Amino acid sequence: MADTPEIIATLAREAQLQQLSSIDGLDAKAASLIGFAGVVLGLLFTAPASADRWNVAMTAGAVGIITAVVPLALALVPRKYAFNPSIDALEQGWGTAPPNEVHEATTKSIIRALLANGESLRFKGLFVRAGVVLLVLGLLLATAGVLYAVNHPTAPSAKVATTQKKGK
């Protein structure tokens, strides 16, 4: 049966692995959302409705989508994450120590890494959430602009030009 220090060290290691998994998950979400933003912008700029019926809502939507990429890219900025304890350090400093002391040192080291990584994880999550909010707002505006362009096939300037030609 495992003793208390070993159980605590195991739980701390599992918490650290979960934290690092969360960091990887946020990176994957940010990268996927940046790709999605690129696809949506490509569709928006090449849509038949956008060529001759571009409007303010489409512009605002495109700006919102482009702006969303900034916090998402900041979430992807490489950072150095702690993964403690270092096996070399354990072997050199604790190789002959009693198991309880090794478990205690290991647990403290992992907890330091959890605290150090926690702040980075918090900011990474904040950047991803901000990017999602901006992306959704941009999508809503762009969709409204496309719907307006499709449901109002002739732009106001085209109507004026058509009316002027008929009057002559």
Image (cartoon, rainbow, N blue to C red):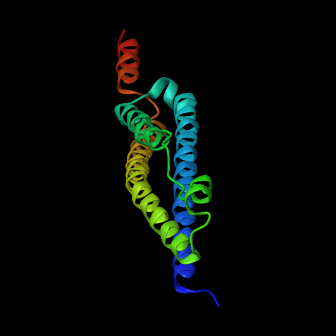
Q: Residue furthest top?
A: 168
Q: Which residue is drawn at 47% across and 33% down?
A: 153
Q: Quadrant of residue 54?
A: top left
- The relative height of residue 95 versus residue 157 in the rendered view (above or below) is below
Percent of width and height locating residue 21: 57, 60
Which residue is at a point 52% across and 67% down the rendered structure image?
106
Q: Which of 129 and 160 is in front in this view?
A: 129
Quarter holding the N terminus? bottom right
Q: Residue at x 58, y 46 (%)?
A: 32
**Position in image of residue 31 (x %, y %):** 56, 44
Q: Residue 16, position in %: x, y?
A: 53, 64
Q: Quadrant of residue 145?
A: top left
Residue placed farthest to the bottom in the image? 1
Considering depth in this image, is 161 or 55 the residue closer to the camera?
55
Of residue 95 and residue 104, the one placed in the foreground of this image is 95
Task: Answer left or right for 115 relative to 81.
Answer: left
Which one is in front, 136 or 160?
Answer: 136
Q: Which residue is drawn at 50% across and 52% down?
A: 82
In the current view of this chain or complex, which residue is farthest to the front?
96
The image position of residue 140, as x and y in percent, is 41, 47
Quadrant for the C terminus, please: top left
